[in-house]
C-alpha cells in the first residue's frame, strides 16, 4: 500500500510539472508570435516610450531576451516563476495591478462551492436513478430513467442556465419572497444571480445545474455496475450463505460497484470545469471559470497561467484521490 | 455429533422428523420466463438422499442439474425462474412451503453449496476470512474476532497451510485448488447436514481434482453428511458416489446404485454415456459418441425427449411419454424398454 501511494504521488508530481511547463511554453509562444503584452499597460494602441516599456517589461518579467526568439522554451523565466510560486508570490494583473493571490482568495471558494453542490447532485441523483433502473431492468422505469437522463445530458448547459435565469428564476423568487421574505434562505436560493452576501445559498441552484452535466453517463455507469454485480456468482454465493437481501446489497454489491462510480466522478470533474465557465458567466458568480475566461480575453498572461495552473493542480489532485480510493476499495489494485 | 445435529435441527427447522429421509426431492418442476414464454428447465426431478450417502447427479450441460440444486437451496431468482411444482423435503419438512426467513436459516445451517468456479464465486473485495466469518457473524451472532478464529479453524480443516496468515488474504492470492478449498471451508462452516457440490472440480487440473474429491470424501465421512455431487464427468462419480441420478432434458431418466448403474444401465442414454468414456482396454479404438445435440428446452421432442438420439428408439418413443419403470427394486428408468436395456437385450 505504501509503495502504491508513493508511486501515485510521484506520478502526480511529474504530471503537474509537465502541465505547468506546457502552460508556460504556450504562453511564451503566444508572446513570441503575437507580440508583447506589456504594451497593453499603455492602452494597447499608443506606442509607448521605449524606456517606460522596458520598465514595465521588467516589472512583469517580460524583459528576457528569449521572448523575442520564436520557439525558445524560455526556461529561465519558467524557473523564476516556479520559485515565485513557492514563496507564495503569484504576481499581479496587467490591468489595475492587483495581487493575483488575493483574487484567487475570492474566486477559488466560490468555484469550490459550485463543485461541492454539483458533485453532490451528480452522485446523489445518478446513484438513486441508476440503482432504480438496475432493479427494474428492462421495464418501463428503466427506459424512462435512461431516456430522461440522456435528454438532460444532451441539452447544453447554457440552455438550461438561460431558461432558468429568464423563465423560472424571477417568478419563483417573487413567490418565495412573498411567503418567507427576502432575507430568508428560500428568498435567496432561487435568485437568478449570485449575491455576495449569501455565498452558499445563491450557489446551490447553479451547482445543481452544473451537476446535470454527465448525469446520463453516471446513471448508466451505475446501472451497468450494479447489474453486473447483481448477476454475479459471488452474489449467488452470498444468497446461498443465507444472507438477507439488504446485507447482500450493502456488503456485496455496493462496494463492488464503487470502482466505476469513482472513475466516473473523477472523469466528470474535468468536464464540470467547462460547465463552470458558462455557469459562472451566466449567473454572475466571481469564480475561477469566469476569471480564466476574462483573463484570456484581456490577454492577462500571468492570470491565465495561474488560473490554469490551479485547475491543473485540482485535476491532478482529484485523479490522485481517485487512484487512492481505487486501492482502498479493491485489494487487487492495492497488491499490484 | 448426533446430539449437535438434533439441537441445530430443533432450533432452526421446526417440525423436523429425524426418522424421515434426510432429503427427498419429489417431482420438482422449474420453469424460466423468457420473453413472455415459459420454458421448462426441470420437468420432474425426483431422488432421495440419506445421511452419510453420496448421490451423484449426472447430465450434460443444460440438463437441469444446476437448476435443480439451486431450487433446493432456494436461490433461484424469481423472475425469471418459477418453481411450479414438486416437493423438497428436508427431514420431512417441505422447504418449498416455508417462508423466506426459514429458508434463509436452512441455507448454510442445513444445506450448503460449493460452486464450480471459486474465483468468481468468491467476492474479490473481501478477505477469505471475512467471507467465511460472515456466516458465523450472521447466523451465530459471533464477534468479528471469534468469527475470524473459527474461519482459521475451517481453513485448517480443509488443508490450507499456514491458515493463520492466509485468513487475511484475498481470493486472487490463492491458487485454483486452494480457492476451491476456501469455498468448501465456507460451505462447511455451519456444519450442514447436506453439502451440494456443483461441479466442484471442473475448473481445476486433474491432480488438483483428485485432491479436492478426496477432501470432500474425507469430510463427508467425518461429519456423516449427505453429499450431492453434480457433475458431467462419470469418471469422477465412479469412485466416490453411492447412488446416481442421471438427468436428461430436465428430468431424472435413471436412478440406481452406482455399481448397478455402471454394470447394468437401464436407460439407453446412460448406456451411451458409459460407452463414451475412454477406457484403457479400448485404446486405439474409436470412441463411441452420442449422435446429435441436447434438445432445446423451448421445443422438446415429442414423446421421449431422448428418442432422436437413441439407438434403441422405436415408433412409439416419438409419440408416447415413457413411464417410470423399475427393472429391479433399487433401479428405476424412464424408458419404454427399461427391462430390455437392463437385461442388455438392446
Image (tube, grey):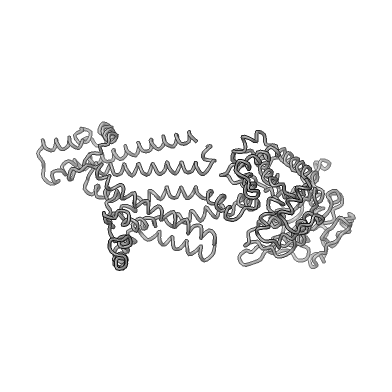
Image location of residue A45, percent across then percent down? 13, 46
* Residue at screen point 68% across, 53% down: B107
In the image, is residue A149 above or below residue A76?
below
Residue furthest to the left: A49
| Occupied quadrant, residue A168 | bottom left
Residue A73 visible in the shown view: no
Image location of residue B228, percent across then percent down? 75, 50
Using the image as rendered, state which of residue B298 and residue B15 is in the foreground: B15
In the image, is residue B166 above or below residue A206?
above
| Left or right: residue B89 compared with residue A326 | right
| Left or right: residue B138 compared with residue A129 | right
In the image, is residue A101 above or below residue B36?
above
| Occupied quadrant, residue A192 | bottom left
Numbered label tally: 0
Using the image as rendered, state which of residue A198 and residue A253 is in the foreground: A198
Image location of residue B1, percent across then percent down? 77, 45
* Residue at screen point 69% across, 57% down: B71
* Residue at screen point 35% across, 50% down: A273
Image location of residue B266, percent across then percent down? 85, 56
Residue B240 visible in the shown view: yes
* Residue at screen point 32% across, 39% down: A22
| Left or right: residue A203 compared with residue B198 | left
Using the image as rendered, state which of residue A232 and residue B250 is in the foreground: A232
Amino acid at each position: 500500500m505504501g509503495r502504491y501511494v508513493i508511486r501515485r504521488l510521484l506520478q502526480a508530481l511529474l504530471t503537474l510539472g509537465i502541465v505547468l511547463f506546457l502552460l508556460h511554453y504556450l504562453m511564451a509562444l503566444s508572446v513570441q508570435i503575437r507580440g508583447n503584452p506589456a504594451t497593453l499597460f499603455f492602452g494597447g494602441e499608443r506606442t509607448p516610450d521605449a524606456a517606460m516599456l522596458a520598465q514595465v517589461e521588467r516589472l512583469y518579467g517580460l524583459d528576457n531576451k528569449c521572448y523575442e526568439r520564436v520557439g525558445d522554451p524560455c526556461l529561465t523565466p519558467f524557473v523564476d516563476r516556479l520559485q515565485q510560486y513557492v514563496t507564495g508570490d503569484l504576481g499581479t494583473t496587467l490591468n489595475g495591478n492587483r495581487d493575483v493571490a488575493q483574487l484567487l482568495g475570492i474566486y477559488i471558494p466560490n468555484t469550490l462551492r459550485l463543485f461541492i453542490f454539483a458533485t453532490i447532485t451528480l452522485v446523489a441523483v445518478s446513484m438513486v436513478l441508476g440503482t432504480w433502473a438496475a432493479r427494474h431492468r428492462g421495464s418501463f422505469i428503466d427506459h424512462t430513467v435512461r431516456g430522461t437522463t440522456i435528454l438532460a445530458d444532451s441539452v447544453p448547459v447554457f440552455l438550461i442556465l438561460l431558461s432558468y435565469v429568464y423563465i423560472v428564476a424571477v417568478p419563483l423568487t417573487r413567490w418565495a419572497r412573498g411567503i418567507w421574505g427576502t432575507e430568508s434562505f428560500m428568498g435567496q436560493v432561487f435568485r437568478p444571480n449570485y449575491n455576495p452576501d449569501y455565498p452558499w445559498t445563491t450557489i446551490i441552484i447553479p451547482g445543481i445545474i452544473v451537476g446535470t452535466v454527465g448525469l446520463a453517463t453516471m446513471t448508466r455507469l451505475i446501472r451497468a455496475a450494479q447489474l453486473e454485480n447483481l448477476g454475479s456468482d459471488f452474489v449467488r454465493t452470498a444468497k446461498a450463505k443465507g444472507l438477507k437481501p439488504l446485507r447482500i446489497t450493502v456488503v456485496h454489491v455496493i462496494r463492488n460497484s464503487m470502482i466505476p462510480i469513482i472513475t466516473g466522478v473523477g472523469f466528470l470533474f474535468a468536464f464540470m470545469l467547462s460547465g463552470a465557465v458558462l455557469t459562472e458567466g451566466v449567473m454572475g458568480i466571481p469564480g475561477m471559470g469566469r476569471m480564466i475566461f476574462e483573463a484570456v480575453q484581456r490577454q492577462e498572461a500571468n492570470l491565465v497561467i495561474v488560473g490554469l495552473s490551479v485547475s491543473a493542480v485540482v485535476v491532478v489532485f482529484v485523479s490522485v484521490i481517485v487512484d487512492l480510493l481505487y486501492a482502498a476499495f479493491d485489494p487487487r489494485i492495492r497488491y499490484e | 455429533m448426533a446430539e449437535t445435529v438434533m439441537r441445530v435441527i430443533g432450533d432452526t427447522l421446526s417440525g423436523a422428523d429425524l426418522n424421515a429421509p434426510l432429503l427427498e426431492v419429489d417431482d420438482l418442476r422449474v420453469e424460466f420466463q423468457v420473453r413472455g414464454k415459459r420454458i421448462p428447465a426441470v420437468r420432474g426431478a425426483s431422488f432421495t438422499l440419506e445421511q452419510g450417502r453420496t448421490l451423484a447427479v449426472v447430465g450434460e450441460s443444460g440438463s437441469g442439474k444446476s437448476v435443480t440444486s439451486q431450487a433446493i437451496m432456494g436461490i433461484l431468482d424469481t423472475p425469471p425462474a418459477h418453481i411450479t411444482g414438486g416437493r423438497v423435503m428436508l427431514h420431512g419438512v417441505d422447504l418449498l412451503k416455508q417462508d423466506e426467513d426459514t429458508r434463509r436459516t436452512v441455507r448454510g445451517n442445513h444445506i450448503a453449496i460449493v460452486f464450480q468456479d471459486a474465483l468468481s464465486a468468491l467476492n474479490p473485495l473481501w478477505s477469505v476470512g471475512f467471507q467465511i466469518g460472515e456466516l458465523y457473524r450472521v447466523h451465530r451472532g459471533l464477534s468479528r474476532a471469534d468469527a475470524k478464529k473459527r474461519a482459521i479453524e475451517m481453513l485448517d480443516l480443509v488443508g490450507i497451510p499456514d491458515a493463520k496468515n492466509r485468513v487475511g488474504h484475498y481470493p486472487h492470492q490463492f491458487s485454483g485448488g486452494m480457492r476451491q478449498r476456501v469455498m468448501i471451508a465456507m460451505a462447511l462452516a455451519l456444519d450442514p447436514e447436506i453439502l451440494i457440490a456443483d461441479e466442484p472440480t471442473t475448473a481445476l487440473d486433474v491432480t488438483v481434482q483428485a485432491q479436492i474429491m478426496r477432501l470432500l470424501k474425507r469430510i463427508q465421512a467425518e461429519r456423516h453428511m449427505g453429499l450431492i455431487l453434480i457433475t458431467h464427468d462419470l469418471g469422477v462419480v465412479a469412485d466416490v458416489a453411492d447412488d446416481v441420478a442421471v438427468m436428461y432434458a430436465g428430468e431424472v431418466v435413471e436412478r440406481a446404485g452406482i455399481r448397478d448403474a455402471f454394470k447394468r444401465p437401464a436407460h439407453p442414454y446412460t448406456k451411451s454415456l458409459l460407452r463414451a468414456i475412454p477406457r484403457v482396454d479400448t485404446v486405439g479404438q474409436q470412441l463411441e459418441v452420442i449422435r446429435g445435440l441436447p434438445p432445446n428446452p423451448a421445443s422438446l421432442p415429442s414423446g421421449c425427449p431422448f428418442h432422436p438420439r437413441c439407438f434403441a428408439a422405436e415408433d412409439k418413443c416419438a409419440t408416447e411419454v415413457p413411464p417410470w419403470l423399475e427393472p429391479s427394486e433399487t433401479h428405476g428408468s424412464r424408458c419404454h424398454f427399461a427391462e430390455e436395456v437392463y437385461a442388455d437385450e438392446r
